[in-house]
Image (spheres, rainbow, N blue to C red):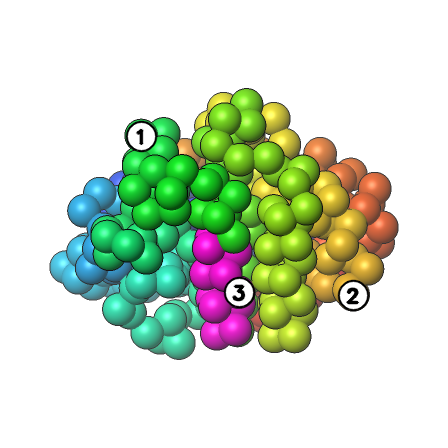
């Protein structure tokens, strides 16, 4: 029987923006008793200058994981996944599985690419320069981008409401606004049509940006009513965060009405009762 506490399907290394090497992450997964470790390096994205893998690093990423699969056979099942961005130029079908995510918005006025989850100034510039100072208009554009990624049928739809990462004080937009909720619900509908697996991502809490996981509880409830499925991920960038917040995430899912979560295994995604 698969155990959600022993599978970490969203992980990064020093080949993108992680703090530990692929080898260190694999060794930690083994030491911590994990059964499955899924690497999901940030795909090469031409507009990125900071944290996505370069083509050369992508090759090293694939080659190293191939070696680790052999080294840890019988100890930890290691999978070579990808976190594919909306503006990526990679083919995610070449990987064991892939997470579809939105980390950037392209300004409708300036054509500039903005990282929406990194520096507060970038988020503010995006709102001011491309959305006339209307933070909710920017959030609506974000959820339209999420819908576009969902329509590509990723195995996992990444941190659905990542746009809220830097908005913990509500400085940029009102997360309870009808406009915000309608935009999120429209993206959820597209995700449901394409049978996406929605992750409950604990990474924003681990890194101190939020006190709540992605997605917000009301979104989880709406997803459950649609009949959607969820998977728990840590979006781990360090060896000590491979399964951070899993128990809390499972309880959150249960409170939202879910009786099971999906678990990544060497045989694919399988259900696990919670």
Residue where numbered disc 1 is placed: 121
Q: Which one is in front, 19 or 49?
A: 49
Horizontal and vertical percent position of residue 89: 26, 69
Disc 2: which residue: 227
Report the residue at 52% width, 73% height from top.
151
Decide: few, some or many residues near mark 3? Use Cα within 10 Å; few <14, some 14-19, many ≥20: many
Question: At numbered mark 1, what does the secondary structure look like: helix, strand or loop?
Answer: helix
Q: With 134 as the anchor, is 56 left or right in this view?
A: left
Residue corresponding to mark 3: 147
Q: What residue is at 81 percent from the left and 46 percent from the top?
A: 256
- Residue in the picture at 30% in, 64% down: 88
Q: How many marks?
A: 3
Asked whether 119 falls inside the magenta stretch, the response is no
Image-based side of 157 in relation to 13, left or right = right
Magenta-drawn segment: 141-152
At horizontal 77% and vertical 64% (from top left) the residue drawn is: 226
The residue lying toward the viewer, choosing from 136 and 214, is: 136
Say above or below: 71 vs 118: below
Q: Position of residue 213 (x, y in %)?
A: 61, 37
Q: Is residue 149 visible?
A: yes
Instruction: Determine whether 133 is above or below 63 in the image.
Output: above
């Amino acid at each position: 029987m698969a155990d959600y506490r022993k599978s970490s399907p969203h992980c990064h290394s020093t080949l993108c923006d992680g703090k530990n090497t692929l080898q260190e992450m694999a060794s930690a997964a083994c030491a911590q008793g994990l059964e499955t470790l899924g690497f999901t390096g940030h795909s090469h994205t031409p507009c990125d200058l900071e944290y996505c893998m370069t083509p050369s690093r992508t090759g090293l990423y694939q080659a190293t994981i191939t070696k680790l699969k052999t080294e840890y056979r019988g100890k930890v099942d290691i999978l070579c996944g990808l976190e594919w961005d909306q503006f990526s130029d990679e083919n995610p079908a070449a990987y064991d599985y892939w997470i579809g995510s939105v980390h950037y918005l392209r300004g409708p006025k300036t054509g500039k690419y903005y990282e929406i989850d990194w520096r507060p100034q970038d988020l503010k510039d995006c709102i001011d320069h491309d959305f006339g100072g209307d933070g909710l208009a920017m959030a609506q554009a974000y959820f339209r981008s999420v819908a576009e990624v969902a329509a590509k049928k990723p195995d996992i739809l990444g941190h659905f409401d990542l746009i809220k990462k830097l908005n913990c004080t509500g400085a940029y937009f009102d997360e309870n606004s009808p406009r915000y909720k309608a935009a999120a619900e429209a993206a959820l509908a597209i995700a449901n049509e394409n049978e996406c697996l929605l992750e409950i991502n604990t990474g924003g809490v681990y890194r101190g940006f939020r006190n709540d996981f992605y997605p917000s509880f009301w979104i989880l409830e709406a997803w459950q009513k649609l009949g959607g499925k969820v998977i728990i991920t840590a979006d781990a960038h360090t060896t000590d965060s491979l399964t951070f917040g899993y128990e809390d995430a499972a309880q959150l899912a249960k409170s939202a009405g879910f009786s099971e979560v999906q678990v990544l295994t060497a045989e694919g995604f399988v259900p696990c009762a919670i």
